[in-house]
Image (tube, rainbow, N blue to C red):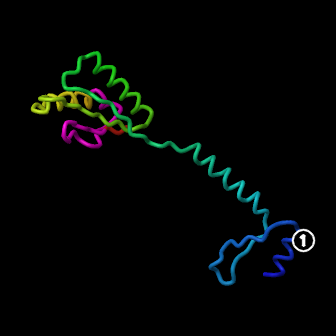
């Protein structure tokens, strides 16, 4: 070990312990600063290439008009095309909660409109005053 340390100092490099649990411990003569820089550079490259999937939300109401429906569905289509998941939320207000089938019809219409680009990951379920459904890209 001392001879390796002397060699590393003679070359102006560092002695780095690669496998400390091995018997005898494995060491390597290298420029440690350059090694750490190369590792960080490779990590940045890998991070640049990965795509993180986000959960985007589009909110609807039971009595939504056709134009509003088309606009919101177009946004959901764009989110799915970007590779993100879409949480479709049906918001009920007041006595609308008494007729969840009206909201379910709108959610079914959304899923059929987007069936070419996305699939249903979580089916529509009522949670309090909101009914939610999650769509994932195909």
Residue 121: tell me if it is visible. yes
137 horizontally vs 99: left or right: right
Residue at position x 68%, y 71% from top?
A: 18
Q: Which image quarter: residue 114?
A: top left
123 horizontally vs 116: left or right: left
Taking the magenta stretch, the answer to whether it contains residue 120 is yes
**Residue beneath label 1, please?**
10
Where does residue 8 sit, x and y in percent of width and height? 84, 71
Q: On screen, 96 above or below 39?
A: above
Residue at position x 35%, y 34% from top?
A: 57
Q: On screen, 8 above or below 90?
A: below
Where does residue 17 sit, x and y in percent of width and height? 71, 73
How dense is the environment of label 1, judged by Cα within 10 Å: few (below 14), some, or many (20 and up)? few
Q: Which image quarter: residue 67?
A: top left
Where does residue 50 sit, x and y in percent of width and height? 53, 45
Residue at position x 22%, y 36% from top?
A: 130
In this figure, what is the number of numbered marks? 1
Q: Secondary structure at mark 1?
A: helix
Which stretch appears magenta?
113-134
Residue at position x 33%, y 30% from top?
A: 58
Quadrant in which the C terminus is drawn: top left
Where does residue 137 sit, x and y in percent of width and height? 37, 37
Q: Nearer the viewer, residue 103 or 25?
A: 103
Type of secondary structure dominating the magenta stretch: strand
């Amino acid at each position: 070990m001392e001879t390796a340390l002397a060699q590393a100092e003679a070359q102006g490099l560092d002695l780095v312990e690669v496998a400390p649990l091995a018997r005898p411990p494995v060491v390597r003569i290298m420029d440690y600063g350059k090694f750490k820089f190369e590792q960080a550079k490779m990590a940045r490259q890998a991070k640049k290439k990965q795509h993180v999937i986000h959960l985007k939300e589009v909110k609807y109401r039971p009595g939504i008009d056709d134009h509003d429906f088309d606009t919101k569905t177009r946004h959901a289509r764009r989110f799915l095309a970007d590779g993100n998941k879409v949480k479709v939320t049906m918001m009920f207000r007041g006595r609308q909660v008494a007729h969840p089938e009206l909201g379910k019809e709108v959610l079914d219409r959304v899923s059929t409109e987007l069936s070419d680009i996305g699939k249903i990951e979580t089916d529509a379920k009522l949670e309090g005053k909101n009914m939610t459904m999650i769509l994932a890209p195909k």
